[in-house]
Image (cartoon, coloured by chain):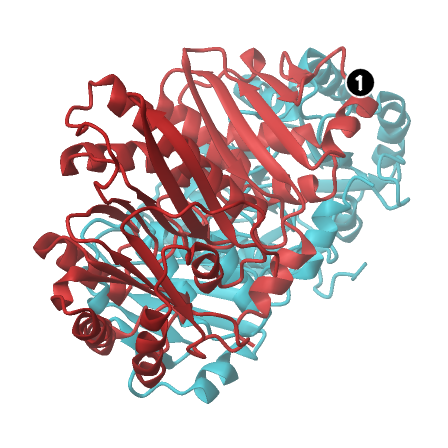
Chain colours: A cyan, B red
Amino acid sequence: MSQLTVEMHPVSGVYLGTCVAKIKKNGQPDLVIIELAKGSITVATFTQNAFCAAPVIVAKQHLEQSAPRALLINSGNANAGTGEQGIFDAQQACVWVAEELGCEPSEVLPFSTGVIGEDLPMAKLKQGIPEALANLSITGWPQACAGIMTTDLVAKGVSREVMIDGHSVMITGMSKGSGMIHPNMATMLGFVATDAKITQGCLQQCLSDAVNASFNRITVDGDTSTNDACTLTATQQADMPLIDSTHSQAYQDFAKAITEMMTELAQLIIRDGEGATKFVSVVVEGGKNSEECLKVAYAVALSPLVKTALFASDPNWGRILAAVGRAGVVDLDINAIKLFLGDVCIVENGGRAASYTEVAGQAVMDQHDITITIQLNRGTANEVVWTTDFSYDYVKINAEYRS
Amino acid sequence: MSQLTVEMHPVSGVYLGTCVAKIKKNGQPDLVIIELAKGSITVATFTQNAFCAAPVIVAKQHLEQSAPRALLINSGNANAGTGEQGIFDAQQACVWVAEELGCEPSEVLPFSTGVIGEDLPMAKLKQGIPEALANLSITGWPQACAGIMTTDLVAKGVSREVMIDGHSVMITGMSKGSGMIHPNMATMLGFVATDAKITQGCLQQCLSDAVNASFNRITVDGDTSTNDACTLTATQQADMPLIDSTHSQAYQDFAKAITEMMTELAQLIIRDGEGATKFVSVVVEGGKNSEECLKVAYAVALSPLVKTALFASDPNWGRILAAVGRAGVVDLDINAIKLFLGDVCIVENGGRAASYTEVAGQAVMDQHDITITIQLNRGTANEVVWTTDFSYDYVKINAEYRS
């Protein structure tokens, strides 16, 4: 397992405790509790999958009732497809945390990630919760990053001190996920905390916009998970004026910082994509609207034929063009499209560009980071999604995950 | 290469000639000409991909102008993404065939399958066409089956004598395709001929319905191709009354036979799916309408996580349920769904079925042919699609195709 290479700055009012509860078979940390100081505001987004896991159902209910004082996260078991028992278990785990912290169970939000369809190992949780709480520390971020991992090879954290309206604000966050990554909110967990002073309304708007531009723009395999969630907590402890309008400069600066950090967290997931050997940006320019740009971008990003060609470092532009053609864009004129690999124009006028050489295309494909740009030339909308290639290891990891 | 194991009965009025034109690098047959007797009626369906290949454009134009007298098929080169040059080349090839046969160029339909983005090797075609014509024979079906193959491992043909209204009718057909298979009309070519006496209107209706129930229900990887086409020719030479109404019993019997044969040809493509180790039927029952049944069926059939689990013979029902959940069905109640592997109920009430055992699920998954049944229990519509698993070999074949 790769360790974090970034420094995770503490955020006032956020305490993290991690332990090995033996939910994961590999003996790695798998239980994390994040305690949030009184007065903190937390907003969240959850999976759009109709088959959502028990903790998602419980977390949504609790979030409607109370301001969260703690986040309880386990890896190794998703508590999904577990019916009524799963709901009961998620609620019970919140009760145990609440009893220890002296708060209401509805002030605890549960999150789970891992194997689907097996009951949560409650005895292990009951034993692990006090242990994780005993480790609570404002410097506990790196251990927590490791504790939320499943098939991840790399722990994912970002941290930044930004100046908002002349005042220092700290933002620190972590994410997990490497397979089953697709909008909206694929098997992806993200937890971001800041000490900013900001209203619930502004914070909610900020999270929605940031997730839409980051976690909802990454895809490994098109599979959205049952358990995805992303939280954004503002502890209100920074020495700064309250951000109470989305029109203020302070809000704009704050939202920009959050979006940048979430984009970084999202891209870390793609870079750690299951079996990934490439980091691929699919840029679509000149569409009539955002929707058709995304249709084209996802058709290309999800095409197994494009993804296997990327794995082979093969500049097979025909497969890209074929994916564009089947994306379902109305009245698409293939002859108007230009296609670029990096800076190299590979397609124009419905065929291979006159200036194109295999050598130039190959030079781009041999790189680790590849940008595919598709110019539709029929409007002013632009979009980008990030994805990976499909390798032998993708099949291996997903064929052997349960064994 | 596996040889045909079925007998291909000749169809009066249909002559097939095949040769090695060296378009394919492996020295296998790659050029096929099918001559159709005067008076034959031919109908066709083509790819829905906006980026359609030059031969598709030319074949559509020719079909509007004339009744086809010949089909010209080459494998090894798709003549797609070749711009104006590609159109010119496809037309020129038709001219060469027409000159030899003494018909109009518009009476020749061109078809190509193979690598995208490389110009058709015209010198090889010019040399091959007379050679293929010299081989024209009413018994040339098996050689033609081999001549249209690309990454196919198995030649695909079916042939049947059916009784329509007390008269013997012959139906013989072939298909090719093993990757890039997805509705509508993925890199799939199908050529079916019969000696039936039937009007153009009835024949067109018959083809549309049959393709919709067969070739448009198979998927390997979700990629639709630039070159797909399926033709149905009726030479009118059988000794029988004319079928001139879709309401007649004769039409119903004929349409049933064509649909059954096309379903068989389509399933042969799936059984030969690139790297396939499983033949999977995804059955969706009890939907509100056909559209939502297909949404669910394709979400499951195309999920890389489901497909890799199938490859691993892993009864990972959670991945199936997650795919159902993200299929985009409005107001889907996960708790009402029942999921079966073969006859084994694996999911009910939103979780693992009480009666389910891993042993029972494993026994189904260990088989080569697997049926996944999803009962939505919210209506009366049913659908089925056929697909394969995702294996190491799928990645290998598609990563190395051009090298």
Q: Which x, y percent locates residue B225? A: 38, 56
Tag 1: amino acid = Glu
Determine whether A396 is above or below A335 in the image: above
Q: Which residue is mark 1?
A: A99
Residue A325 quadrant: bottom left
Tally of marks: 1
Q: Nearer the viewer, residue A160 or B203?
A: B203
* Viewer can see residue A207: no
Residue B227 quadrant: bottom left
Q: Is residue A356 left or right of residue A392?
A: left
Q: Residue reaching furthest left?
A: B65
Q: Could you tell me which residue is drawn at 54 percent across and 72 percent down? A: A369
Q: Nearer the viewer, residue B258 or B394?
A: B258
Q: Which x, y percent locates residue A31? A: 80, 37
Q: Is residue B279 left or right of residue B146?
A: right
Determine whether A11 is above or below A279 in the image: above
Q: Which x, y percent locates residue A320? A: 40, 64
Q: Which x, y percent locates residue B87? A: 21, 72
For label 1, count other residues whose C-alpha is less than 10 Å away and answer few (under 14), some (14-19) or many (20+): few
Q: Is residue A353 left or right of residue A258?
A: left
